[in-house]
Amino acid sequence: MNVSVPVPNLSLIGPEILMLVLSCGLLMVDLFIPKDRKRIVGVLALLGVVIIGLVTATYWVGLSKPVTTFSGTFVMDRFALMFKEVFLFCTAITILLSLKYLEMEGVSLGEYYALMLFCTLGMMIMVSGADLIVIYLGIETMALSVYVLAGFMRFNQKCNEAALKYFLLGVFISGILLYGIALTYAATGSTQLAQVASVVKAKGLGSNPLLVVAMFLLAAGFGLEIAMAPFHFWAPDVYEGAPTPITAFISVAPKAAAFAALIRVFFYGIQLLMPHWQVLLWIICAVTMTLGNVTALLQENMKRMLAYSSIAHAGYILLGVLAANQMGVQGVTFYFFAYAFMNMGAFGLVIYLKRGNIVGDRVDDFTGLAQTHPLAAVIMVIFLLSLAGIPPTAGFVGKFLLFAAAIKAGFYWLVVIAALNSVIALFYYFRVAKVMYMKNPEPLPQPVPGKGLVLALALVSVFTLVFGIFPQPLMALAKNTAHTFFMFMS
Amino acid sequence: MELNFGTNVFGFPILSLVTYLPLAGAIFILFVNKEKVKFIKYFAFAVALVDFFISIALWLGFDRSTWHFQFVERCSWIKALGVEYYFGVDGISLLLVLLTTFLTAISVLSSFNYIKERDKEYYIAMLVLETGMLGVFVALDMFLFYVFWEVMLVPMYFLIGVWGGPRKLYAAIKFFLYTLFGSLFMLIAIISMYFLYHHITGVWSFNFVKWTYNMHIPAGFQFWLFLAFFLGFAIKVPLFPFHTWLPDAHVEAPTAGSVILAGVLLKMGTYGFIRFSLPLFPEASKYFIPFVAILSIIAIIYGALCALAQEDMKKLVAYSSVSHMGLVMLAMFALNPMGLEGSLLQMINHGVSTGALFLIVGIVYERAHTRLIKDFGGISKVVPAFAAFFMITMLSSIGLPGLNGFIGEFTCLAGVFKHNWVYAAFAVTGVILGAGYMLWLYQRTMFGRITHEKNLKLTDMNLREWIYMTPLVITFIWIGIYPKPFFNIMKVSVDHLVERVNPGYFKQKAQHEAKLKEALLKLSHGEKAQALD
């Protein structure tokens, strides 16, 4: 028997290779850097991430249609590229947020940055996976790093609790995901998305019970990182306990990765089960956003509030997924950029308020900020507006696209639910604006923000505004992404 | 059909200039040291005043013989969605633009003493608010319109919430949530129409002119869209039963906030109906006439009765707004030229009159630190000039002939009467009750013996107050005596709108008049014949 091993096109995994080299390299460099200057590792990581981001961007031109490699298990397309940029952006911002934070917490270690890069590597593999196994590998690489990061302040009890909770749930759900993959394999004889799709089509497995169960399990598997109901319980505790920069990171990047994988699997693999997964996602979407928003109303802790708000945002994003049209993919892509800007920004402000013994994560810690730090307050208002979906911010444009996608697909009632949710959301977001502007400050030690934090806040706030007022460039990219995304199937 | 998107006689983007000048001023103030309060005040006023003068150029350059949009600016904004940057005014929006710049300048001037803390932020909020409001009136792309519609909420939220009265926090968020609730439904309707337009024409566009003249929305669908828009606009007007946010917001807002709120923000609701709901959903508009009319009549009477019962002057004026805006809505949905013209003019009247009333209440509040009616009495002897201004403003509000309110209310009622005399009969009760609560208010506060010792020390109006009240009074008298320039501006646009909503209205009217004439002729011939016999 003659087995020919096809030579994979390694250039397509260039960004991943670079990321691997960078993270391993950093671990080694870390050995030579004295303990009190670990910040250097962070700066190196940041530089590396920026370079990889630029390198990844150059792939855009060559990807007028999806290209696969490794026998069709790894796909590089504009969709993957855009999400990789989201991850790299989040990583860069998180590093900026972390530089001083880690020193204040006394855990400035080089591994932190390496772990974050490993995590990013996992996510980059995840969004390019055209095979369930590859996606699984990506998700595990990501998750294992995130567990460690979430518990990075190992002397802090809350932080330990967060990590443990995250880990236990994560491992459990990962088993469920594997089970879903196994069932898919059992029903179709393949784990490769394209082959799954063709078998489903050829054998008419559109309502195969085995496959429907697999669909549920897959949704659950991705649902943990997405933090969609009913797999959202971990989010508030983990968000509260984890180091704040990591919270910011978890709230955006892994969520984006899981969404991308979900879209990939549902659209490429089990597209013919759409009637089933649309019903499933409809219910999840309605429950997730309502639950997230209503619970957020009751929170006194900023990090917990943002945790619930991020659950609600997962609900909005699901609108774009279950619409299952080009506009939906366009909306999800755009929204994740907007979401990265505004959510990282909001958490950045929480870090900004950290001073002395004050964690800065209670809503009351924002009291009177408009008078003590007018600029910080204005920036926070920009993020709040964007989170609430009010123009002229990127969050509004993103939400507009998601609503439009769902309306196009005919989900009027779901959009009405989403609209009502937006009203609820405004209430708790603007509670923060209220304490900032309408209450008088108490005499407290002044926060001294690091340069990295200031740079990060400046970047994301400018992006939030600019892409709200001139969304065209990003929108065109997102539109093109959605267009090429659907070429895979034809 | 070849669409006419309008022209721009000035050749340069004057509407953008008018709209963004306040924003530019606000950004400039951002960089001024907050200790320089005096400079900030005068600078903000200067910006608002210059903006008003520029907007007068619109009045002068406006071509009164066409219903097409004028001073148009149009270019692509978000190409990927087909969103345009499309500004323009016609006879319907021009006066509202002028009203906005006029009232903003006055309210900035009126805040000089009232605002005693965080001046810098206050004037920034005022100017940003002006940009938002102007944007709403000039945007002709539905996406752009929606953006301004929402943007404007933010500075208003802060105006109420930071500089407001004791219950400001509650009032501010209530205002914000209510309006957002309505506008999100409008957003859903806008998106649906966006897809419908694409379905019909194959073009992605939010352009209002294209939507109006290139698309006929199926009647069943119009029904839903109308209701969604209705929710957005009716909350803003506010129409009964969506009015509950208004008294709270008004009572808590600082004086200038109330002036802007009553003078301009409420007009956005009625403007929305005239600009968008009527031409886009003509069939649904006609279908819903009784529904809107009944709500309006309830608002007129209920608002007036509530006003009668108030003990707080500001709340009284707030409820009188509910009543007056009810009349504006009722006249608009008479859907005949007279009703629409009256409705538009009454919007302007209500803007200046109620704005002036809030200023009056503000003036007395600055001195006495109370707004309760029972704390006053007989003060006309102490502050005669103030009493005179109050008298004129009050008379203007209740529609005394010779002042603006009369012209507006008369035209409105005549329009309603033509449509349905029963509605008019109910609406008139509002006018009567209006005279009741206003005169009673005046009597209780101004006439009689001085009931409180400390009121003897009240000072009369100062120069600054004279300066900002006088233009308002001049406006009352101008519109009251010579309203023709105002009607001239709106006439062609209104007639076009009527023809759009009621196709064949003018033809029928002409036929009807011809018949009448014939009958009269016959009659007179008959008389002549009889006489000859």
Image (cartoon, rainbow, N blue to C red):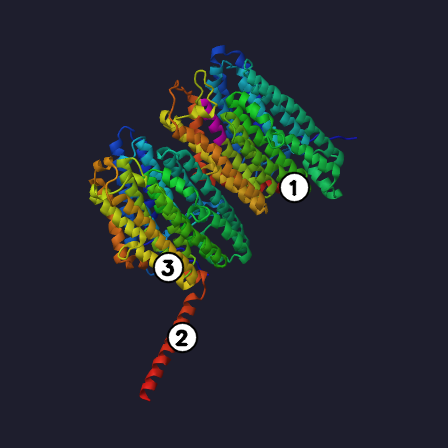
Q: Is residue B348 visible?
A: no
Quadrant the N terminus of chain A occupies: top right
Task: Point out residue B178 in the picture as x, y percentages from the top left corner.
Answer: 46, 41
SS category of the residue bearing label 2: helix
Task: Point out residue B241 in the picture as x, y percentages from the top left corner.
Answer: 46, 47
Q: Which residue is mark 1?
A: A279
Q: Which residue is mark 2?
A: B515
B46 or A330, nearer to the observer: B46
Marks 1/3: CA–CA distance? 53 Å
- Work out which residue is located at the far right of the displayed protein and give it: A1
B372 vs B14: above or below: above
Question: Which is closer to the viewer, label 1 or label 3?
Answer: 3
Check if mark 2 and mark 3 are on a common chain.
yes
Chief secondary structure of the magenta portion: helix
Amino acid of disc 3? Leu
Residues at discs 1 and 2 in contact (Cβ within 8 Å): no
SS category of the residue bearing label 3: helix
Task: Point out residue B422 in the picture as x, y percentages from the top left corner.
Answer: 43, 61
Q: Is residue B516 visible?
A: yes
Q: Chain of mark 3?
A: B
Marks 1/2: CA–CA distance? 63 Å
Check if mark 1 and mark 2 are on a common chain.
no
A163 or A327, nearer to the observer: A163
Residue A343 painted magenta: yes
Q: Chain of mark 1?
A: A
Residue stretch rendered in magenta on the structure: A341-351
Marks 2/3: CA–CA distance? 25 Å
Q: Which residue is at 57% across, 23% downward?
A: A238
